[in-house]
Amino acid sequence: MAGTMITTIATLLAVFQAAMCNNNNASSSSHVSPDPSKFFPAVNGNLTKIVWAHAVNSVAELDKALSSEDIMMLEADVVVGKLNSSNQTDIPIMAHPPAVESDLSLENFLDLNIQSNKTKGIKLDFKSNQAFEISKPILAKLRANLTFPVFLNADILPGPVNATTTPLNAKDFLKGANETLPESILSVGWTTRYGKEFNITEGRYSTKQIQTMLDALKENKVTQPVTYPVRAGLAANDVDAIKTLLNTTSLKSATLTIWSSEGDSVDVAKLSKLITEVGVDKVYVDVPEDLKSKLNLSAASTMSPAAMMNLGVSMALLVLARML
């Protein structure tokens, strides 16, 4: 009896280890837009430890971010405009509306990231349908060289609080992202009207807004990894609704990207609760440093694949020891 049980445990351990190895091999063989948690092994699965740079929309800002030892992800905005170092117009450039001129085009931005040490990931925030459409050929051309995490971001639905900004076309963005860079992480969110610009300090993501997003992903047969960018002050006001967003999706790898503008009203305790309950392995925190420093994530936890393997081995050995 004991011999049979020992054989069974050994077999289970071998199967478990093989599955873990196969999973690691599969991820390592995918060179284009790798999983951030594997690309940045030092975070040990804790996505809140990933450090972001904002508005990397100029050559100077890009040089600064690439030379920083702390920065891990570069967020930059893509609009249609003029490259002021040439006569090129109506091309995708790195700028935030209402700016329509820059010294950095999308192609320059990508080339410089490719030529760097490739130790940082990027998040491209497309500000219009046209900006995304004319960017697709560039992304397709450079696809094989994008061997770092790539987030393709757009607000594809109207959101809180009665947001009036026109979102990008959801169907076109989701389809275009899949056809152009299927390995990328889809970062799809809602337009918002919140913060000191509008003197609005109350609001939340409604059940209807969340369901509309889930429906859009389902209707467009999205299978890529997805992260939902949610505004900190709004997400913190309804923890259960945001948890529903992740729990009801068929996309097992779905995550949150919590962001905030300077001066936003944010309930720090509620936001900490949200991150803790969702899990730090499922939440990117892209907020101003003064807000991030106030977050209490001591109760949050995550378990890496290696830790899972060690736990499985330990439990099996414990059972075996008790039998002998």
Image (cartoon, grey):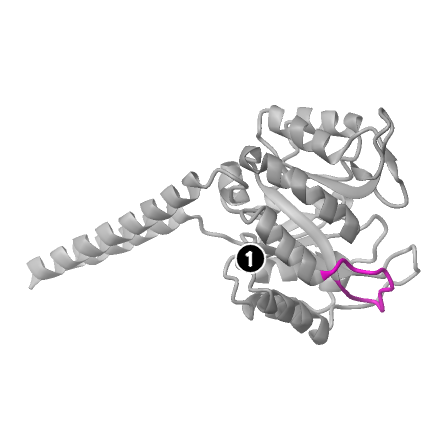
Left or right, 68 with respect to 44, comes to right
Q: Is residue 164 visible?
A: yes
Between residues 103 and 134, which one lies in front from this camera angle?
134
Q: Position of residue 47 (x, y in %)?
A: 58, 47
Front residue (pair 322, 51) = 51
Q: Tell me what residue is drawn at x 66 percent, y 67 percent.
A: 213
| Residue ID at (50%, 46%) | 45
**Residue depicted at x 68% and y 56%:** 173
Q: Which quadrant is home to the N terminus?
A: bottom left
Residue shown at 62% from the left, 57% from the top: 175
Which SS type dominates the magenta stretch? Answer: loop
Task: Check disc 1: other Cα within 10 Å, few if <14, some if 14-19, many if 20+.
Answer: many
| Residue 234 included in the magenta stretch of the image | no
Residue 233 located left or right of residue 151: right
Q: Position of residue 16 (x, y in %)?
A: 28, 53
Report the amino acid beneath label 1. Answer: Gly
* Image quarter of the C terminus: bottom left
Q: Secondary structure at mark 1?
A: loop
As rendered, which of 220 and 196 lies closer to the eye? Answer: 220
Magenta segment includes 158: yes
> Percent from the top left, x then y, of residue 216?
64, 67
Disc count in the image?
A: 1
| Magenta stretch in the rendered image | 157-169
> Can residue 269 be seen from the camera position used here?
no
The spot of residue 221 in percent (x, y) is: 55, 64
Rendering quarter of residue 93: top right
The image shows residue 182, relative to residue 109, as above or below, that is: below
In this view, the residue in front, 324 or 117, is 117
The residue wearing badge 1 is 279
> Relative to residue 59, is residue 303 drawn left or right?
left
